[in-house]
Image (cartoon, rainbow, N blue to C red):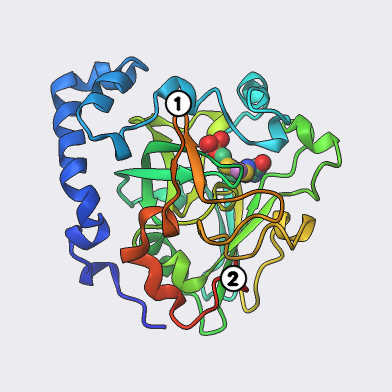
Amino acid sequence: MLIKKPADIAPSEITPPELYSRRREFLKSAATLGAMALLSPFASDTVARATDDDLKPTPYKDLTSYNNFVELGSGKTAPARYAGTLRSKPWRVAVEGHCEKPGAYNLEDFLSPHKTEERIYRLRCVETWSMVVPWLGIPLNTILPRFKPTADAKYVEFTTLLDPERMPGQRVNLLPWPYVEGLRMDEAMHPLTLLATGLYGKELPDQNGAPLRLVAPWKYGFKSIKSIVKIRFTDRPPRTTWNLEASDEYGFYANVNPNVDHPRWSQRKERRIGDFFRRDTLLFNGYADQVAGLYTGMDLRKNF
Ligand SMILES: Nc1nc2c(c(=O)[nH]1)N[C@H]1C(S)=C(S)[C@@H](COP(=O)(O)O)O[C@H]1N2
Ligand SMILES: [Mo]
């Protein structure tokens, strides 16, 4: 797989064309609001009105009070209630596996000198709710090359913090802890893939995966692993949490696909948080133009 260097990628390619003009609208409206307004949750309503419905950001309040983060409790409201236990500062990130420059870093050193960008992405959960999130993040393809992955680095594995003191949900054996997710190397290097550090112009709230969370917008929400402490280059597919838990329900790829049902429910429709009517789920969550090429020749029913 040919991997483009960041320098070869035009800004219009990094931000997909369909998002590009809207991102400018978002920035323009954000600018008129001023920095203070952007820091306020009320900014969400104003920003929302500046965009069309499909990428209208979900209100800040909903993004931060309706969550899935089993380590902070099961149920959609528990993560916000237990958020205070996580203590995401200070934070360290380890880089391991098939690379020439492994290491352990303070978060600040891990992120520097990379610039964060705003990206408004759809997020589609396997349980058929969806949201639109104005992320702040760093494209993973600008960070990974620093560690000089070797030719054996075919996949990237991500691991969440393991600490039952700070993550009360880990005192219960609901899932095999710690939470692990993974991407194929070319998926990790795709320009859409982010390491998110914030949303709505502010730092990530704990319940959304502070201080560092993966975002691959064409995949179901469970791939976007939260509160990452380890990144490991591997030569075989990582053993991911939900796939270990129920391999017939949650595949390694987890690409959003309205044509492949979950064994217990259809994936054809979704309910956008805040909407009354359900809407059609889009192949690759609406990012087919950008990512379908990653899966050429693969049977998406088998590799779900
Ligand atoms: N570590 C960890 N990451 C996780 C989860 C989790 O339980 N633990 N839940 C996943 C699921 S199923 C979804 S849908 C998204 C939800 O992200 P949100 O709460 O920001 O909407 O986080 C994903 N990342
Ligand atoms: Mo989910």
Residue shown at 69% from the left, 60% from the top: 240
Q: Nearer the viewer, residue 209 or 288?
A: 288
Residue 47, compared with residue 156, is above or below; it is above
Query: Where in the figure is residue 170, as x and y percent of width and height?
Result: 79, 38
Question: Do the numbered discs 2 and 1 sit on residues whose CB atoms are within 8 Å?
Answer: no
What residue is shown at x 34% (from left), y 32% (from top)?
Answer: 57
What label sits on residue 301 in the rendered view? 2
Q: Disc 1 residue type?
A: Phe
Q: Earlier in the sequence, mark 2 or mark 1?
A: 1
Kind of element beneath mark 2: loop
- Residue pointed to by mark 1: 276
How busy is the neighbourhood of tag 1: few (under 14 within 10 Å), some, or many (20 plus)? Answer: few
Residue 104 image offset from top left, x and y in percent? 58, 56
In depth, the one of 22 and 159 nearer the eye is 22
Q: Amino acid at mark 2?
A: Arg
Quadrant for ligand 2 reads top right
Rendered residue at 56%/42% (across/down):
128
In this rendering, does residue 190 appear at all?
no
The image quadrant that residue 141 belongs to is bottom left
Say which quadrant the N terminus sits in.
Answer: bottom left
Q: Is residue 145 left or right of residue 235?
A: left
Looking at the picture, how far across and down is residue 167, in whole percent?
A: 73, 33
Neighbours of disc 2 within 10 Å: few (<14), some (14-19), many (20+): few
Asked which secondary structure carries label 1, the reply is: loop
Looking at the rendering, in which quadrant would you find the C terminus?
A: bottom right
Q: Residue at x 49, y 35 (%)?
A: 271
C-alpha gap between disc 2 and disc 1: 30 Å
> Relative to 122, is 267 on the left or the right?
right
Identify whether 8 is placed above or below 85: below
